[in-house]
Image (tube, rainbow, N blue to C red):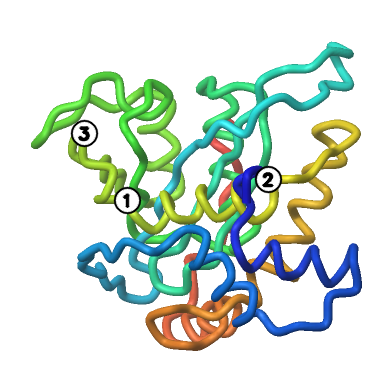
Amino acid sequence: MKQGVEMTAIWLRLQENFGYKGGYSSIRRFVHRLEPVKPEAKIRVHSEPGEDMQVDFGTVGQLYDPVSKKMRTAYVFVATLGYSRHQYAELVFDQKIATWIGLHKRAFLFFGGTPKRVIPDNLKSAVVKALVHDPELGEAYRKLALHYGFLISPTIPHTPEHKGKVESGVHYVKRNFIAGQEFVDIRTANQHLRDWVMNAAGLRQLGTTGGQVLMALIQMLLLIGFAVLARGSPGE
């Protein structure tokens, strides 16, 4: 708990590392005795299949860079589909425009298509000037959107709750995957992260429907399908 690990991850690591045989409910009750839960009022925002994808960065501390051969501050990029909550995640060392564009392209390939709308935060790689009604977009990001045919819909400044699904996704990666773990380098960490996204995060149950994330994604694809990525990259 001091390392910031979520209860589900604590339960799994107790099973894997110490042979714990108890149920998750026992872990939850014990943690809640140590840290009583303060109820919060929240409104869930429903998304239609294929409607939107929320994207964001989160700092994850220091990782070893095999290129520069030194420890560097790393960030996790998370793209979360609004309907299924399935996510693409990747660890990087910067938030530059080229990195930002590349992460989007790899996310689209991972999901097998593009959503109608992408909701980023107002970081400089996406939005040059954050305004409520007509934000000024970065040129490279604007061209990417035109090429793949999606609408960029930045959050209103100082309202992170407008992209609450990816905020939760970043928090989930940091507390369930990163916290309490050590990796040889960023490449190894990304290999484990890809496996975790599919075999742990993808199999979790949604609080809204009780179904699994990957099953919700399959349902979405059967309902509407995604736009096929038949076009090349911008400039190709």
Residue designated by label 2? 179
Residue 158 numbered mark, or none: 3
What is the quadrant of residue 212 in the picture? bottom right
Give the mark nearer the N terminus: 3 vs 2: 3
CA–CA distance in space, label 3 to label 2? 27 Å
Answer few, some or many: residues within 10 Å of disc 1's Cα (few below 14, many 20 plus, some between 14 and 19). many
Give the mark nearer the N terminus: 1 vs 2: 1
Q: Disc 2 residue type?
A: Ala
CA–CA distance in space, label 1 to label 2? 23 Å
Answer few, some or many: residues within 10 Å of disc 2's Cα (few below 14, many 20 plus, some between 14 and 19). some
Q: Is residue 153 above or below residue 12?
A: above
Residue at 26% over, 45% down: 153
Residue at 60% over, 76% down: 204
What percent of the width, then of the height, locates residue 37? 38, 64
CA–CA distance in space, label 3 to label 1? 11 Å
Q: Disc 1 residue type?
A: Lys
SS assignment at label 3? loop
Q: Disc 3 residue type?
A: His
Residue designated by label 1? 163
